[in-house]
Every structure is written in C-alpha cells, then in structure tokens.
Amino acid sequence: MPRMIVTHAVKDVEQWLACSEKAAKAFAPYATDVFFYTIPEGGNNVAVSLNVHDMDGLMALSNSPEHQAFTEEAGVLHPPHGMYMEATG
C-alpha cells in the first residue's frame, strides 16, 4: 500500500484543519492512516499523507464535483504544489 503525500496552499489553516475530520472520512474508502500537517512557523502551506489501497477510487474522488466543493469549503488553493508517492525498490 503506497504512501502518498499531497502539498498545497490554503486560504486559512484553521479553516482547513476544521475540515480535516470530514476529509479523513471521505478518504476512508480508499486510504488509511490519513494525517494532516502544518508548518510550525506558520504560513498557509499544508500537507496530507495517506496510505492508499484504492488509487483508482481516490483519483475518481479527487476529480468528483463533491470533492471540488469540499476543497472550496476547506479553503484549498489549486493546483496542489506537489503529489508524492512513496518510492519502492
């Protein structure tokens, strides 16, 4: 199960964090161990990491109108800075 990390900017970190439980529930059918990260020094750059067991489902979710509405509610600024997958040997 590959670990994915997505980084992006948000309008307001507290607004984004307030939506983290809702995001974790939305990701649950496709991934486990969902964690949310902020920068200790402040700023509006954040990250999410998750262990993905259904990549096709996660990609479909990320392209859905429901997910787009949710990211707007959470204050996510698009596009993401980066999407990283755990390197495997």
Image (cartoon, grey):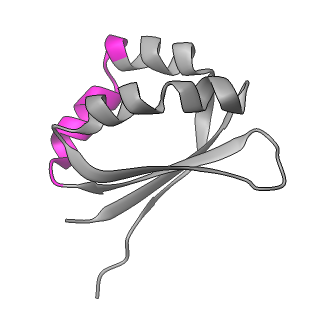
Magenta segment boundaries in residue numbering: 53-66
Q: Tell me where residue 2 appears, x and y as whole percent.
A: 27, 65
**56 inside magenta stretch:** yes
Judged by its main secondary structure, the magenta piece is helix
Q: Residue 74: which quarter of the image?
A: top right
The N terminus: image quadrant: bottom left
| Residue 84 vertical position relative to residue 11 in the rendered view, above or below | below
**Eyeballing the image, is 73 above or below 44?**
above
The C terminus sits in image quarter? bottom left
Q: x, y percentage for residue 48?
A: 49, 48
Q: Is residue 63 above or below residue 27?
A: above
- Outermost residue, bottom side: 89
Judge left or right: residue 50 versus residue 20: left
Task: Give the residue drawn at x 33%, y 13%.
Answer: 66
Magenta span contains residue 40: no
Q: Where is residue 55 in the image (x, y as percent from the top left)?
A: 21, 48
Taking the image as shown, residue 18 lies to the left or right of residue 29, namely right
Q: Which residue is drawn at 28% across and 36% down?
A: 27
